[in-house]
Amino acid sequence: MNQHTRIIGVPTDYGANRRGVDMGPSALRYAGLVDELSSAGVSTEDAGDLAVPHHAIHDADAGGENAKHINEVEEVTTALADAVADALSDEVTPLVLGGDHSIAIGSMVGSARDADIGVVWFDAHGDFNTPETSPSGNVHGMPLAAALGIGDFEGVEWANAPRLKEENVAIVGLRDVDENETTAIQDSDVTAYTMSDIDERGITEVTQDALDVATNGTDGVHVSLDLDWLDPREAPGVGTPVRGGVTYREAHAAMELVAESGAMRSLELVEVNPILDEHNETAAVATELAASGFGKRIL
Ligand SMILES: NC(=[NH2+])NCCC[C@H](N)C(=O)O
Ligand SMILES: [Mn+2]
Ligand SMILES: [Mn+2]
């Protein structure tokens, strides 16, 4: 496989309640991302990090707001959307390094600017809240609803990806969903595969189904990999860990299927928090999974 990718770092934690995920891009680079990708036969250019507004006070722990730091999220995701769209028009695959999962708004908007896309969302969470349903006010719990224009996000131009349809979105590995978020997912045309589905049918069949959903009638697929998708024993460096996630091998099997589909248009690795990690192992796992997504095989 001969592929080219452009790394776009997005060192932000404005969408999360626990600090430190803004150091994710450094941790991923330090874990050897470029070497790992080159062992997959992928050539990499590193565009560095996007500028993220700095505020002396980060009030993510403060209550009250129902979409905390939404202005900073808008600023960052708007710049990211342009960077992702630019990479695609230069015919390189954008590889976005988070940062918290709010950045996915920018990845999806950019990836869908000139194409009809599907999304495969590997995550413990639905990230389907809106400011009115969110129990936390953290925007990293809202990016799918934002891109799809659900609830408060309807008509919010910077956040919506009009060329992404609900019926082309597949969430894989769900195991922690808020009450009103559950209803919103059920009322939508999004397909959600829970951990119970993976228990019953196995990771291969479920991932294949998810890829079918995302490729059906689209020009390509944005793959969003939240590291809390994995079991916290394998990926401890995340801000919102949930027990009972996929194993290291299941994660690789899924990413190998992503590569085999030939449909991956853009990829993001999010929610790596080096402060909560053990010896950078979550970042290391993330780089290995990215390589599998780009076609690395054992033999
Ligand atoms: N990308 C994430 N880690 N999202 C976690 C979201 C947690 C919770 N559902 C919330 O809305 O706050
Ligand atoms: Mn998550
Ligand atoms: Mn997430």
Image (spheres, rainbow, N blue to C red):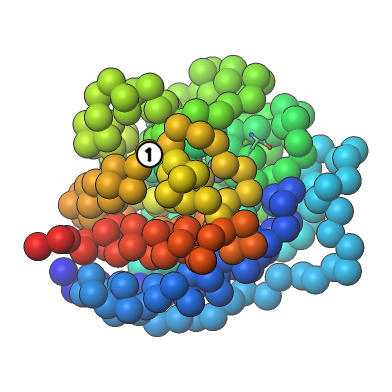
For disc 1, the marked residue is: 246
**Picture quadrant of residue 139:** top right
Q: Does residue 78 appear in this view?
A: no
In this view, the residue in front, 251 or 48, is 251
- The image shows a total of numbered marks equal to 1
Q: Quadrant of the N terminus?
A: bottom left
* Horizontal arrangement in the rendering, residue 162 relative to residue 285 (left or right): right
Picture layout, residue 195 above or below residue 158: above
Q: Quadrant of residue 202?
A: top left
Q: Is residue 69 left or right of residue 96?
A: right
Under tag 1, what secondary structure?
A: loop
| Residue at position x 65%, y 19% in the image | 179
Rendered location of residue 272, percent (x, y): 55, 58
The answer to whether 167 is drawn above or below residue 30 in the figure is: above
- Quadrant in which the C terminus appears: bottom left
Percent x, y for residue 154? 67, 36
Q: Is residue 89 above or below residue 45?
A: above
**Residue 63 picture quarter:** top right
The residue sitting at 86% across, 53% down in the picture is 59
The residue under the point 29% across, 42% down is 250
Q: For the view shown, which residue lies furthest in the left direction?
A: 299
Residue 113, how many percent across, how many down? 48, 57
Instruction: Name which residue type carries label 1.
Output: Val
Image quadrant, ligand 3: top right
Q: Residue at x 53, y 70 (%)?
A: 27
Return the residue nearer the eye: 29 or 147: 29
Is any atom of residue 235 visible in this view? yes
Position of residue 178 measured from the top left corner of the image (x, y, whole percent): 64, 25
Q: Is residue 267 above or below residue 48?
A: above
